[in-house]
Image (tube, grey):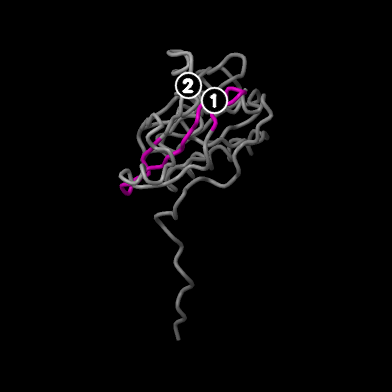
Amino acid sequence: MLLAIDTSAGTTVAVVDRDRGIIAERSSADTRAHSEVIGDFIAGCLADSGVPTTAISCVVAGMGPGPFTGLRVGIAAAQAFALGAGVPVVRVVSHDAIAADLFAAELAATGSTGPLLVVTDARRREVYWSAYRGLDDAGLPARDGEPGLARPAELAEVVPGFDGYRRVDATEVSGGALGMLAERMFASGREFASATPLYLRSPDVTVPGAPKRVS
């Protein structure tokens, strides 16, 4: 039983199980209220699912790409819950969960999948992007390289083979999709994402240098 948390776009929390699927999920598209809702969403999902904290075996953290201020809220919440529950944290690229969800819908509708470009808002008139060639032999999203950051007008220049991808501009990440992708990655023996968040640029707020000496 996994608890999945992502704040790379809006805020989403879900309780999932490999056999039972998505048991409970709560989400908000608001990109500026992560801290205000994350605690209620975690408590709400546990209550909605009827799953006690002791039944959670792992916490899944969405690692972005996403803006610094929002993304760190979900990662910190995942780490704090895992520490309190005495369970490990596994990390998943948020765009991979979006791609997994889109590929599942495409597969159900057409019986096949094709190249996909996932794009999300990075603010400052920029976007995050990840390119996928489809599903691999294990049914997992096959990403071409690492996620990137660009201005919308520059995508055709920075994405190799841009015209060959179906572009989808996503506004949120499904916590359920994030958790179920983690389940499939574990079952397939795949490596999870690294512990380094995918901010892809410096934070808006920086720590000032050493104070000047006053004599």
Q: Which residue is mark 2?
A: 113
Residue 126 is situated, as x and y percent measured from the top left of the image, at 34, 46
Q: Are marks 1 and 2 in contact (CB under 8 Å)?
A: yes
Side of 149 relative to 49 (left or right): left
Q: Residue 88 location, x and y as percent? A: 66, 35
Q: Callout 1: few (<14), some (14-19), or many (20+) C-alpha neighbours within 10 Å?
A: many
Q: Position of residue 196 (x, y in %)?
A: 57, 47
Q: Please name the predominant secondary structure of the magenta segment in the image.
A: strand
Instruction: Please state the horizontal and vertical placement of residue 23, each as a whole percent of the image.
Output: 53, 17
Quick one: SS at disc 2? loop
Seen in the picture, residue 56 relative to 79 is either above or below; the reply is above
Q: Which residue is mark 1?
A: 135
Q: Quadrant of the N terminus?
A: top right
- Magenta segment range? 119-142
Q: Earlier in the sequence, mark 1 or mark 2?
A: 2
- Please report the residue visible at 66 percent of the width from the left and 28 percent of the height from the top: 186
Image quarter where the C terminus lies is bottom left
Q: Nearer the viewer, residue 25 or 90?
A: 90
Check disc 1 and give the amino acid type. Leu
